[in-house]
Image: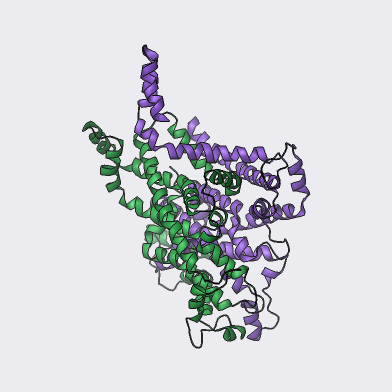
Chain colours: A green, B purple
Amino acid sequence: MSQTATMTGSAPATGGNTATDPRGPRPKPFFTPKKIMIYTTLVFFTLYFLFPLYVMVVTSLKTMPEIRFGNIFALPSAPSFDAWVKAWTSACTGLTCNGLSPGFWNSVKITIPSTIVSIFIAAVNGYALVNWRFKGSEIFFAVLIFGSFIPYQVMLYPLVILTRSMGIFGTLQAVIVIHTIFGMPILTLLFRNYFASLPQELFKAARVDGAGFWRIFFEIMLPMSLPIFVVALILQITGIWNDFLFGVVFAGPQNYPMTVQLNNIVNSAQGTPEYNVNMAATVLTGLVPLIIYFVSGKLFVRGVAAGAVKG
Amino acid sequence: MADTTVQSAPVAGSSSRPSALKKFFLHNLSAKVAAIPMVATVLVVFIGCTIWTIYYSFTNSKLLPTGKFVGFDQYERLFATSRWNVSVINLLMYGAMSLVLTLGLGFLLAVLMDQKIRFESAFRTIMLYPFALSFIVTGLVWQWIMNPTLGLQGTMRNLGWTNFTFDWIANPRMVLFALLIAGLWQGVGFCMVLMLAGLRGVDEEIWKAARVDGIPTWRTYISVVLPMMRGVLVTAVVLIGSGIVRLYDLVVALTNGGPGISSEVPAKYVYNYMFSGGNIGQGLAAATMMLLTVLIIMVPWAYLEFGGKGRK
């Protein structure tokens, strides 16, 4: 429909223009049918994207009787943070009733070291791959990238056995190791591409001056790679915070990250479900990545697009 | 490890051969030491663990991976299990719909965003924010919205639209579409960002040329610009495809496979047999089938991308 409209609309326009002004279309008024179509479609999709966020927040501020009244769109008549307090301190996850806060701190304890370790190792990898190539380094890199497409389920059980034989299964260390392993392909790619874009003369000059592998890395490469560090940071913090599978398999019940506890609160709770508490818990879990997303702005876009720009 | 080999080389050596050995180990020694985590990940995890899984999928391991070699028994049982067959069909249906719609809507939105519109960055921020959220969060929000009694359906009925029906989450025939709505909500923005980057990468001259030739805008997009975005499209397909095969968290949060087994997916089957079903061999066979699926997608792509470049 719209396609035929634009076709018939533009064909005579270009035909008429050739006589007077062959260059470009004529200036358009703001409210053309095309513009209205564009904005209507965009606004429709915007509503689809915003609706869950709205529902989530509004529901979390209502009381249960109000929710049972059954209007998911309505604003809360008397907004209260009771559900938030309960979600944080005393919601039940099947057996215990300590709320989400232990999960939050577990997620913090998992995310911070995993992010630091995985980024450091990947930065060294990228640097070695660009400036210190050795026999087979490119093959290892290719397998690494290819390996990132293997479903996690394929490697899950052998990794359980490996971490168990290392004596770290069911601990924070195990989750950190697993995040480091599975974050490696994308981060290495990121750093490799970044270091490859730096002028090679810098590296050569430092070599001539007698600086070694680590000295060049810490004193020349690292100070220059702040932008890519920020991108990697955003990528890892949101990715690790949002992880569910590795947390549930490797962390052990006392270290369950927030996502796992959230799912337990909502999906394995006994008794009548408290939707306001559930939604408050959901908002709380989504808050950290959302804050990072809104604060980082364009850098987040760069981060997610970085995975797409294959080197 | 590396140090001992390096030291042993000069001791053993007197002729020219040891110096080659020495060079092999000592050359870039720090780089090799630094690359140990990467090499270990590649050899132990990506290659070692995968081979381990394939090998043990041919055993009858139950609670521990100690079973006897039983050939293709696990695979025969796998395809005789209705839950697995449902999982595979679900993944194929969901995957096809999700791939087509994510790409289609992503491209449509990218084209709209590319029309020099106002508030572009606001629109982009809104479309991409779901991508920053966990699948668990996405699944739980949509579970609440689709709650038949108190969610959208209940609200519409209370507002007077008494035969409004939106019970997909509780309807075995529609539950895949419920998954699709939530999956698209999370993924379309990302696809749009990729496509928009692709569109912006197209040379302005192409547009001028098309305009001079009098080709309508929509024709230019489909016949000229889309083929030029091949790289971005292939990347998007690969990323979306590998995400679909991994689909797990969203199902756990939104439906937990229900109602019944009508929204089970392979990744969940693997997990359940390995960690709660106590039938490792069966889980590993299912995991190997997942690997095979990915290889069927990946190998032609890798061949086209890298094999083609190598020949040129």
For the C terminus of chain A, which image quadrant? top left
Residue toward you, A162 or A149: A162
Residue B252: image location, x then y, percent: 62, 61
Considering every residue shown, the one lying at the far top of the view is B15
Residue A184 to residue A293: above or below: above
Residue under the point 47% across and 56% down: A240
Q: Quadrant of residue B72?
A: top right
- Identify which residue, B11 or B186, lies in the foreground: B11
Question: Which residue is found at the position 45% from the left and 57% from the top?
Answer: A110
Where is residue B273 drawn, in percent x and y?
A: 68, 52
Residue B143 vs residue B54, the one in the foreground: B54
Indicate the quadrant containing the N terminus of chain A: top left, top right, bottom left or bottom right. Answer: bottom right
On the rendered structure, is B161 left or right of A215? right
Residue A242 screen position, x and y as percent: 50, 60
- Residue B210 in view of the camera: no
Q: Quadrant of residue B69?
A: top right
Q: Quadrant of residue A210?
A: top left
Expressed as whole percent of the image width and height from the top left, the position of residue B214 reads 47, 55
Locate residue A209 relative to residue B113 in the image: left or right: left
